[in-house]
Amino acid sequence: SMPRLLASGDQTIFNFKMNVTPPKSLEKWGALVTAFTAHLVERYGLAEIRQWYFEYWNEPDLGGFWTGTKEDYFRFYATTARAVKAVHPDLPVGGPATSRGQWVAEFIRFCRRENAPLDFVSTHQYPQDEYCLHEGRKGSPHEPDMFFIESIRSVREVVDREAGAGFPLFYTEWNTQNCAPG
C-alpha cells in the first residue's frame, strides 16, 4: 500500500483501504525505502537481512492493485531497487510480482536497459487462472490439468532467454486447486 502522504491519488482496494496509486514523488518514495531498509539492517543485522528477498508491490498488471501504467511500475521498481541497494549491494531485490508471468520479458529487458538492479524474477500463479483466460476452458490450448505446469515452464523459458539460464525465478504467490470428488 502506498502511504497516504506519498500517494498520487486516493484509489484503494479491500476493506483495509490499501492505496493502489503510484507515489507522487519517486524521490521521496526512494528515500522512504532507503530509510526503512536501513532500519531493518540496524534492527536485525546485515547477516539476517541479506537472506531476505525484497519484492515491491503486488500484481501491478491487474488494474485493481496498481493504477499506474506498466512503464510507471517499471520506473517505480527501478527507484525501489536502487534504494534497497543503496543500503547494501548484497540485499536481493526483484520483481515484477505480476500475475500469471505477465510483463516478465519486458521487465527483464527494462532492468537491463536501465541498469536497474535485478537479482531474481518473481511472479504469481493459480490453477484457476486458466478459467480467467479461457472461460470454462473454451479455447484453452492446454490439456486438462496441464495449464499450471505449462505456464510455469513457459515463464521459466522466458527468464532463461532474457536473463540467462538458471536465473532465479520465484513464485511468491500461488495455490493449488482442490479437485477432490465431491
Image (cartoon, grey):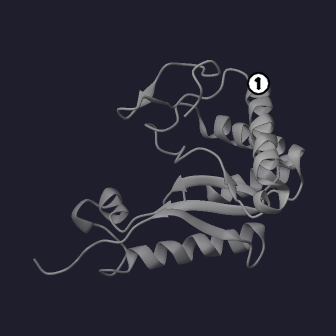
At mark 1, the secondary structure is helix
Location of the N terminus by quadrant is: top right
Residue found 35% across the figure and 32% down from its top: 15
Q: Position of residue 103 (x, y in %)?
A: 60, 53
159 and 39: which is toward the camera: 39
| Occupied quadrant, residue 14 | top left
Q: Which residue is mark 1?
A: 28
Location of the C terminus by quadrant is: bottom left
Eyeballing the image, is 101 above or below 176? above
Residue found 35% across the figure and 65% down from its top: 130
**Dot 1 surroundings within 10 Å: few (below 14), some, or many (20 or more)?**
few
Residue sitting at the far left: 182
Residue 176 appears left or right of 22: left
2 and 101: which is toward the camera: 2
Q: Position of residue 42 (x, y in %)?
A: 82, 46
Q: Position of residue 150 (x, y in %)?
A: 47, 78
Q: Label 1 is placed on what type of residue? A: Lys
Residue found 78% across the figure and 40% down from its top: 39
Q: Position of residue 11 (x, y in %)?
A: 46, 24
136 and 127: which is toward the camera: 127
